[in-house]
Image (spheres, rainbow, N blue to C red):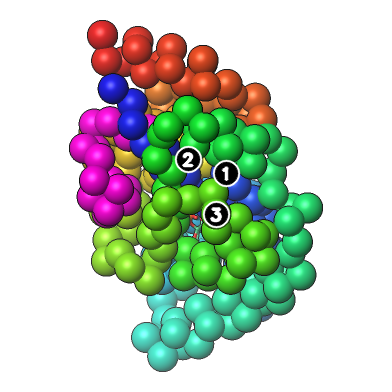
């Protein structure tokens, strides 16, 4: 049965997606093109390096490696200038309540994120105690839609992947969860997260009963 819940960070626990977007849009403008919210969907859940490649594809630009490294560093500096001001007030509605319920029900919990800035965000939001395991972008080689980050969580928790549910705001994350044989709960827009087993606007709109019902439906 269901034994563990694996949570994405950006867009699920906290809305850092908006800071990533502001920072990438600034880079795009400096390069002379517009980067829209629709384009931004493709960046959710994927690594910083891969995000830059997608951004340059949107702008129709090819740049040398040194320039790309500098741009990725610049983006991260802009992003961190927003992140550093974060407080626990920015935890998304219902996220703490849902995580606490999961833990009280005996499910293991993990944070599974592509971000290399996860440690500082966890610290600023004071959420470390909500997770049994944290796996971030510094510890994985393959970015979502590859299931590596989720499979690493499962293995560190000692839980079979098929007994895990993933909570994700990114299309790439839903694909990664399914590639790892896990249930995928989408957080956000059903039109974007078409492949998810269930989509809710936020963790605040989800109950354990509903999660168990989707689980039972998928595993019958
Ligand atoms: C997050 C974001 C992505 C971002 C990635 C890397 O992943 O959704 O847009 O590119 O982290 O972030 P950083 O530049 O901080 O290393 P997730 O998996 O938490 O949604
Ligand atoms: Mg995300």
- On the image, the x and y values in percent for residue 166 come to 40, 37
* Crowd band around label 2 with a 10 angstrom C-alpha radius: few (<14), some (14–19), many (20+): many
Side of 154 relative to 166 (left or right): left
Q: Main secondary structure of the magenta part?
A: helix
Is 106 placed above or below 110 here? above
The label number, if any, that marks residue 168 in the structure image: 2
Is 201 placed above or below 26 here? above
Taking depth in this image into account, of 185 and 3 the one nearest to the observer is 3
Q: CA distance from mark 1 to mark 2?
A: 6 Å
The label number, if any, that marks residue 129 in the structure image: 3
Mark 1 = which residue? 12
The label number, if any, that marks residue 139 in the structure image: none
Q: Which residues are magenta?
A: 150-166
Confirm whether the magenta stretch covers residue 216: no
Q: CA distance from mark 1 to mark 3?
A: 17 Å
Side of 95 relative to 46 (left or right): right
């Amino acid at each position: 049965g269901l034994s563990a819940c694996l949570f994405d960070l950006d867009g699920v626990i906290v809305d850092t997606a908006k800071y990533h977007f502001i920072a990438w849009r600034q880079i795009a403008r400096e390069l002379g093109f517009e980067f829209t919210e629709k384009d931004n969907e493709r960046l959710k859940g994927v690594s910083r390096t891969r995000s830059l490649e997608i951004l340059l594809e949107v702008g129709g630009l090819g740049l040398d490696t040194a320039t790309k490294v500098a741009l990725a560093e610049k983006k991260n500096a802009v992003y961190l200038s927003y992140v550093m001001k974060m407080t626990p007030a920015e935890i998304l509605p219902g996220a703490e309540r849902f995580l606490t319920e999961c833990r009280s029900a005996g499910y293991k919990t993990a944070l599974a994120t592509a971000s290399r800035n996860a440690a500082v965000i966890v610290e600023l939001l004071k959420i470390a105690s909500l997770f049994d395991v944290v796996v971030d972008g510094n510890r994985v080689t393959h970015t979502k839609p590859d299931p590596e980050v989720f499979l690493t969580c499962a293995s560190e928790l000692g839980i079979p992947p098929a007994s895990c549910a993933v909570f994700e705001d990114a299309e790439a994350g839903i694909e990664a969860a399914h590639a790892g044989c896990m249930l995928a709960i989408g957080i956000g827009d059903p039109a974007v997260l078409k492949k998810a087993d269930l989509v809710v606007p936020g963790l605040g709109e989800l109950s354990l009963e509903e999660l168990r019902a989707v689980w039972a439906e998928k595993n019958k």
